[in-house]
Amino acid sequence: MIVRRFLLWARTASPGDRAEAVSALARAYLYGELAPADRRDAETALTAMLDDPSPLVRRALAEAVANAPDAPRHIVVALASDQSAIAALVLARSPLLTDADLVDAAALGDDFVQTAIALRPRLTSAVAAALAEIACAQAVSELLGNPGATLAVSTFARINERLGEDPEIREALLARADCPVDVRQAIAVALASRLELFVVERGWLSAERSARIVREAREKTTVALSAGPAADALRLVTHLRRTGQLTPAMILRAVLSRAMPFVEAAFADLADMPAKRVVALLHDPRGAGFPALYRRAKLPPALLPAFEAAFSALREPQGEGAGVGAQLSRRMVERVLSACAALPAEEAGKLLVLLRRYEVEAAREEAREASRVMAEDAALDVALSHVERGIVEAIRSRRLGIAA
């Protein structure tokens, strides 16, 4: 009876009064102890308010039911298709909306609606994939920044494909710990290509020199990215081979940087052999099986001496000057240079040029690391001297106080 009076009253009440009343009725329905008949009437009244001409009233209803797991589902679904400012309230929060509801809303809604969906506390991989396919850049950025969103590997790749030109999207992709290594590498390649174009257009470097510098920087970055789990290295190698980036020079750099998961994955992929067998051949102390593995991988015969020398140096105990991570090992580079110095010029010309550039790079990295360590040691010495001076002053002050 009370609900029927409410509906009669609502015909003449102001929008503000109706909004307050519908909010109170919704709270009573959700959290009050209504008799079954009154509860049915209340649901009928709330459903009728979906047709209220005032957005203020429908917004009040949306705010009341947005978080409620016991709200009538048909009311929530209807509000999800209302105007954006109202729909966003339930789309961002309601636990009653299914993946299908959210995907439909994202497909039909505007940027505001898509962003609201991306901000939900939990998002399944299916909804995330739909947003990656159709949503605006702002919504995708919020999706990537949402720790409650589950993203499939293919979703990361699609986002980079669609919106990788957007700096905010790139940063958000790289900020996600679960961003696949092949997507990270693709972002690095795209940035390097843009940098190369910029430098050449400005006339700062020739096209040839710029291409070489960018290529070597790309290879160095790729090797650095491979320093994760073996599964990541395999995925990265597969991506590099598919995109034509898995070059002998990159593999040689990886050996000289002691990035063995990447090297093992590369030889296993190129030779089409089981990973365990490849690992055994690469780490054989005698190195007897390596030439056969190398030939099966169809790598250039001219580079075989360089690889053999690199693996020989790799099997020796590592001393000072050994590279770490993406850094080249200066000692290993020098060993390879010595091994290749006697090769005919027509076979080793380009290789020796490459190795000498590696030697310079390794020396500079070694010097940077030594400078960093010395600077840290100097800073520590200064800090300790201040501490010692403070202790001496404290003891002196205490003695003067006792004497007085």
Image: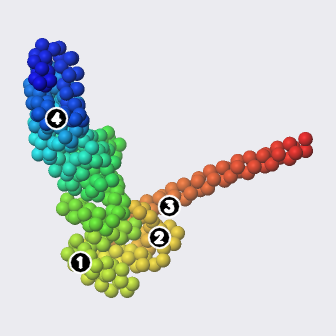
100 relative to 138, above or below:
below
Q: Which image quarter is the C terminus in?
A: top right
Taking the spot 33% from the left edge, 69% from the top edge, the residue there is: 261
Disc 1 marks which residue?
274
- Nearer the camera: disc 2 or disc 1: 1
334 relative to 165, above or below:
below
Q: Earlier in the sequence, mark 3 or mark 4?
A: 4
Q: Earlier in the sequence, mark 3 or mark 2?
A: 2
Identify the mark at residue 35; answer none if there is no mark: 4
Q: Position of residue 220 (x, y in %)?
A: 35, 59
Disc 2 marks which residue?
331
Say what amino acid the circle numbered 3 marks. Answer: Glu
Which one is in front, 15 or 236? 15
Disc 3 marks which residue?
366
Q: Earlier in the sequence, mark 1 or mark 3?
A: 1
364 relative to 124, above or below:
below
